Amino acid sequence: MFVSLASANAETAKGSSNFMRRTIARTVTGVAIVAGLVAACGSEGENGAAGSSGTNGTASSAAGAPSSGAPASSGAGTGDAGQAGGEAAQKVTAAIQQALQQSPITFTTESAELSEKSKTALGEIAKAMQGNDVKIAVATHAGYPDAEKSKALSEKRAEAITAALEGAGVAKDRVKTEATGNEKAQGDKALDTQITVAQ
C-alpha cells in the first residue's frame, strides 16, 4: 500500500512537472508572438508617419494610447495615423476623379486662364483636402514645337491651378507641380491637366 501511494505521488509530481513545462513553453511562445507584433507595429508606424502628421497624427496617437497603455508616441498610435492618412488619400483621390469627370481642367490654346468650370472643379478638390495633410501632384503641358515656349506656358498653367487651390484654402506647399512643356503631351492632349494624390 505504501509503495503504491509513493508511486502515485511520483506520477502526480511527474505529470505536474510536465504540465508546468508545457505552460512555461506556451507562455514563452506567447511572449515571443507579442514581441514580434509590437516590433511589426513599430516599423509600420514609422512608415505610416512619414506621410502624415499634424492633427491626424495627434488624434490617432491619443486614441491609441488608452487601449495599449503605451505613451502617445508609441508605434501603435503612429500606425493608426498612417491608416488615417491612407483613408484621407482615398477620399481626396475619389474627389479628384469625380471633379475631373464632371469638369476636366483644360486650357484653351496659348492660354493659362482657368475657365469657371475648372475653378469649380478645383474648389471641390480643395474641399476634400480640408482637415487632412494629403498632398497632390499637378501635371500641366503645352504642345508647341518650341520647347522653351511650351515650358513657359505649362509653368503659367501650373501657377494658375496652384493659385486657385490656394484661394480655396489649400496651402501652396501641398501642391506639387510638374510643368512638362511639350515633353509628355502634344496637340489637343497638351490642353489637359492631370491631378493625382502625391506619393
Image (cartoon, helix red, strand yellow):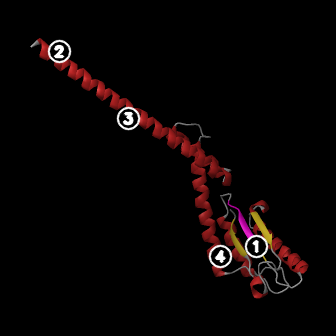
Q: Which residue is mark 1?
A: 139
Q: Amino acid at mark 2?
A: Ala
The secondary structure type at the circle numbered 3 is helix
Q: Gap between marks 1 and 2, in whole Å?
A: 87 Å
SS under mark 1: strand
Alpha carbon separation for disc pair 2 and 4: 85 Å
Q: Earlier in the sequence, mark 2 or mark 4?
A: 2
Q: Which residue is mark 3?
A: 26
Q: Which residues are magenta?
A: 134-138
Q: Nearer the viewer, residue 103 or 190?
A: 190
Frontmost of labels 3 and 1 is 3
**Mark 4, residue position:** 99
Disc 3 marks a residue whose amino acid type is Arg
Indicate which label's residue lies in the foreground, 3 or 2.
2
The residue labelled by disc 2 is 6
Query: Is 42 drawn above or below residue 171 in the view shown?
Result: above
Q: In the figure, 10 relative to 106: above or below?
A: above
Q: Mark 4 and 3 residues: CB-CB less than 8 Å, in contact?
A: no
Q: Give the x, y percent position of residue 56.
A: 63, 52
Place of residue 137 in the rendered image (x, y in percent of width and height, measured from the top left)? 73, 67
Q: Is residue 136 magenta?
A: yes
Number of numbered labels in the structure image: 4
Q: Earlier in the sequence, mark 4 or mark 3?
A: 3
For marks 4 and 1 on the same chain, the one whose residue lies earlier in the sequence: 4
Q: Amino acid at mark 4?
A: Ala
Crowd rating for badge 3 (residues with CA inside 10 Å; few <14, some 14–19, many 20+) = few
How much space separates mark 4 and mark 3, taking CA atoms?
55 Å
